[in-house]
Amino acid sequence: MIIFEVYLSSLQTEDLKQFYPNSLLETGSDLVFFWVARMVMLGKQLTGELPFSQVFLHTMVRDAHGRKMSKSLGNVIDPLDVIHGAPLQILQEKLQNSNLDPREVVIAMEGQRRDFPQGIPECGTDALRFALCSYCAQGNGINLDVATVENASRFCNKVWNALKFTLAALGEGFNPLAPEEVFPKSPMDKWILSRLYHTVVDCAQWFEEYELHSVASSVHLFWLHDFCDVYLESVKPILRSGDPSQLLATRQTLHSCVDLALRLLSPFMPFLTEELWQRLPKRDSKSPPSICVARYPSKEYLAHWCHPEEEANFLLVQEVVRVVRSLRATYQLTKARPEVYLICPEAVPLSVYKNYWEALQTLSLAGSLRFLPDSEGAEPPASCVFARANSHTDIYVDLQGLVDPQKELLKLTSRQQKLDQQLADLTVRVERTRYQEQVSFKAKTAHQQKISLFRSELEKVKQAITTFQKMTRKQKLSPEMSE
């Protein structure tokens, strides 16, 4: 007993007082009895206190096929090979120099050639960490696919390029404001800062529940979709115009988004975010020296950015953008900027479209955007193709001079014949007596949905054929009229 008391007194060091007990232990679920339980028993016995109050367990990390990693299978993924990259030859040499049985070496090498025919590309530490965190930690297992890490590496490049664009837009001598002092006025600024606010709220909630994959998904969605794909594209005309009244507000919004979004990303990508955050203009000498000690975003000081009505309004805008881009892809208008006409008889959504007119035209890649009927009572030209964005909005895209109507008619006529045949075959099959008796309700529902899709596609093709027929007749009449 005396010896035990002497031992306990020797434990009372400054390091022990500072670091024991801890709050959270993170480990694999397969180590509960081998490691976690022993730490609890020894800690309680030697100090009288539990070593931690919470345990965060994750499942076993397996290969892309869901198999347990094994040297004999050759499916072990060395984190250093993912971080620095390794050609197939190096991977095979490691197996040959291991202590595996020669027969197992042959099997393992074949597995490596099948899984990594080009070797493992260099992805970096941050990409590997982000990829691992993007998997759900609770479940049957984490099936780690190197392709997922590659996608995370490309995401790193996207963030880097977004910072390059932002720094170029901010220019020299930019003085950023604190988030509490930034009050957006334009619709797009309100929308992106509201999206950032709700991303902060989501991250806080998921962190509290240890749902790291949900945090990673929220940050990824904001960076890729909201900020890069939508907001940066929408503000390019403003940055090119050089209008001082709009330029300053846009720059403040850009800086706020990048600054706080990097802080949100920092727990997953500390190296990348530190490098980029240091390049941002700082408010004053009292700014934090590192992103690691900078204040993590919280909803308490960002509440003035919450604009749910703007987010709801922008969903309408995105519906129109999606339809216009779909028409552009259908008719292969890669570089052309067609004239777009929008008809909306309802006052509320029409006011939303007009409020977002500039962003709507930019994101639709339209040469011009008009709302009809306008004050002149004009109608869309006969050379327009039509699509419906929603129950109250029709979209017309003018193809005059952008496509060859005769070639398009040949394609559409062939497409119509194919759809007619498919629809007729499926309809005959569904109407058979044996089908009604033997096919399950689920299969019947799927077939009805397919019939509905065929009819909808057929209607679009017929409308396009009518449009191109009008364009063809107009082309034939034009020479005669000129004569």
Image: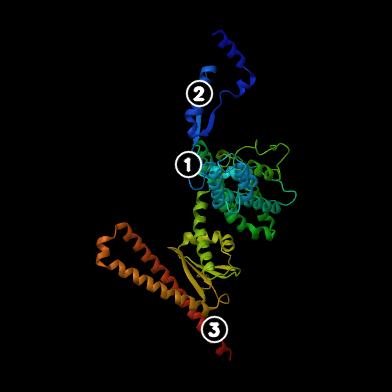
In the rendered image, the quadrant that contains the N terminus is top right
Residue at the farthest right position: 172
Tag shown at residue 281: none
- Neighbourhood count class around disc 2 (C-alpha, 10 Å): few under 14, some 14–19, many 20 upward: some
Is there any visible trace of residue 254 in the rendered image?
yes
Closer to the observer: label 2 or label 1? 1
Q: CA distance from mark 2 to mark 1?
A: 25 Å
Kindly identify the amino acid type of the residue bearing the numbered disc 3: Gln
Where's residue 251, x and y in %? 67, 51
First in sequence: mark 2 or mark 1?
2
Secondary element at tag 1: loop
Checking the image for residue 40, the label placed there is: 2
Residue beneath the point at 57% across and 64% down = 361
Q: Is residue 201 visible?
A: no
Label 1 near label 2: C-beta < 8 Å?
no
Question: Which residue occupies the foreground of this view, 31 or 86?
Answer: 86
- The residue labelled by disc 1 is 141
Q: Nearer the viewer, residue 289 or 368?
A: 289
Q: Amino acid at mark 2?
A: Val
Q: Residue at x 56, y 11 (%)?
A: 4
Residue for badge 3: 475
- How crowded pointer 3 is (Cα within 10 Å; few <14, some 14-19, many 20+) is rated as few
The front one of 161 and 136 is 136
Give the alpha-carbon distance from disc 2 to disc 3, as whole Å.
85 Å
Q: Are marks 2 and 3 in contact (CB under 8 Å)?
A: no
Circle 1 Cα neighbour tier, 10 Å, few/some/many (<14 / 14–19 / ≥20): some
Name the residue type under label 1.
Gly
Q: Residue furthest bottom?
A: 483
- Answer with mark 2 or mark 3, whichever residue precedes in sequence: 2
Q: Nearer the viewer, residue 34 or 428?
A: 34
Q: Give SS at disc 3.
A: helix
Q: What secondary structure is marked by label 2? A: helix
